[in-house]
Image: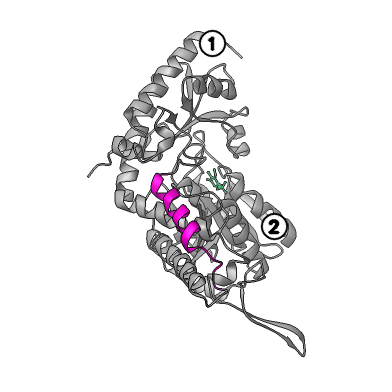
Amino acid sequence: MPLDCYRIRRDFPSLSNGLVFLDNAASTLKPRSVMEAMQSFGLNSYANVHRGVYRLSMEASKAYEDAHEVVAKFVGGTWEEVVFTRNSTESLQMAALTLYANGVITRGSEILITMAEHHANMIPWIRVAKMAGAIVKMLPVDGEGVPRWDLLDEYLTPKTSVVAIGHISNVTGSKAPVEEVAKKARGAEALLVLDSAQGVPHTPVNFKAMGVDMAAFSGHKMLGPTGIGVLWIRRDLAEELEPPLGGGGTVDRVRLGSGGVEIRWSRSPWKFEAGTPPIIEAVGLAEAIRYLGAIGMENVERHEEKLTRILLKRLAEKDYIEILGPRSPDRRQGIVSFNIKGMKPDWAGLALDRKGIAVRTGLHCAHILHDALGHSEGSVRASLYIYNCIDDVEKLLEALDEIHEKHGRPR
Ligand SMILES: Cc1ncc(COP(=O)(O)O)c(C=O)c1O
């Protein structure tokens, strides 16, 4: 059944005043049920987890463990593979540090990323490469800002230890051919790390079936709260690797032995979750996933595709608009970045805000991609989600016409 965006809207109090919210790639709004689940848990069932035998702590631990299970099912994995972090940025940082600490990234080894990456999937690799004496190589992009996947064989070498790519670009919305990249990475004996910050919230995923080794995503981009993200680690890898951070919760036993302090790590995912974890946030994320699950991720994807197709087609008809990214709607998901010719993106964003339309403007943490596309001052980004309906798209298009008519002038 197609998704009923008008009915869904009623679950989001932030939209009750007619706001047109098109900044979903930055963060989504929260449905009532997510906030209520967190409030109820926080008020009635909260205690620290895995640290006490009293009833409240046991119940909180169960809720926290259940949240791992809910997340795991959503991405086709098992609870041992789901590590809670703070956000995608921290997850990718953890991935990079883990692979460095475990000797996967070594002096002279190569890490392959693309020029289209969000800084969250770029800077951690550059920093870790510096520590290890490794080399970061960047797959170039084509004229539409899409990574040159056709050059993958050339860029993969026997020295490649890690391939780290974005699932769906936060600027162009273009989708990576993950299965194909995974096959080639495996052929080169490299691990594949997927930045799925814009993937998991918008499309059905099964990381194992996709051939991914590690993947990152954020709760706040999929109706969940801020302060919780996920690092998914393929099970055998998760069991094998030592965590990059240590402390409470990560160890089974610590003893003073003859050779100094001896550490026996906990099993995964606990050994990767150092310190008191995001407990209330985990309950919120599980509720967000239940909400999305009830709609069905195929329906979420189809709905966004339908609106993207219309938005892209209608924007392309406007001669004062420059679109970033693939012209074909089949090559993107839910995100359309553009500029009004001769107008700075922030200016366009402010003018849209005055008309009750929220969009993101700027370089979207993807400076190199914007430079490559010749939009070094940034762009205006409209990003869609389940509570956006065709009227939101119409309002944006109408507002752009009015802004251009009133203010359009050469820069
Ligand atoms: C593709 C991509 N990767 C990573 C991130 C970072 O997400 P977070 O800010 O939740 O860490 C974002 C956020 O916009 C993103 O779009």
Left or right: 258, with 24 as reference point: right
**Amino acid type indicated by mark 1:** His
Residue drawn at x 55%, y 63% is: 190
Residue 145 x, y percent position in the rendering: 52, 37
The image quarter in which residue 189 lies: bottom right
Left or right: 261, with 117 as reference point: right
Indicate whether 71 appears above or below 11: below
Q: Which residue is mark 2?
A: 129
Left or right: 281, with 104 as reference point: left
Is residue 185 in view? yes
Q: Say if the magenta span includes residue 100.
A: no
Q: Earlier in the sequence, mark 1 or mark 2?
A: 2
Residue 388 x, y percent position in the rendering: 37, 34
Using a 10 Å C-alpha cutoff, classify the residue at mark 1 as few (fewer than 14 neighbours), some (14 to 19) or many (20 or more).
few
Q: Main secondary structure of the magenta part?
A: helix
Residue drawn at x 52%, y 76% is: 54
* Residue 8: assigned label: none
Q: Nearer the viewer, residue 209 or 202?
A: 202
**Amino acid type indicated by mark 2:** Ala
Residue drawn at x 63%, y 51% is: 137
- Per the rendered image, the range of residues in magenta is 31-50
Indicate whether 20 appears above or below 254: above
Using a 10 Å C-alpha cutoff, classify the residue at mark 2 as few (fewer than 14 neighbours), some (14 to 19) or many (20 or more).
many
- The residue sitting at the front extreme is 44
Q: Say if the magenta span includes residue 33.
A: yes
Q: Which residue is mark 1?
A: 407
Residue 226 x, y percent position in the rendering: 54, 49
Quarter of the N terminus within the rendering: top left
Residue 42 x, y percent position in the rendering: 50, 57
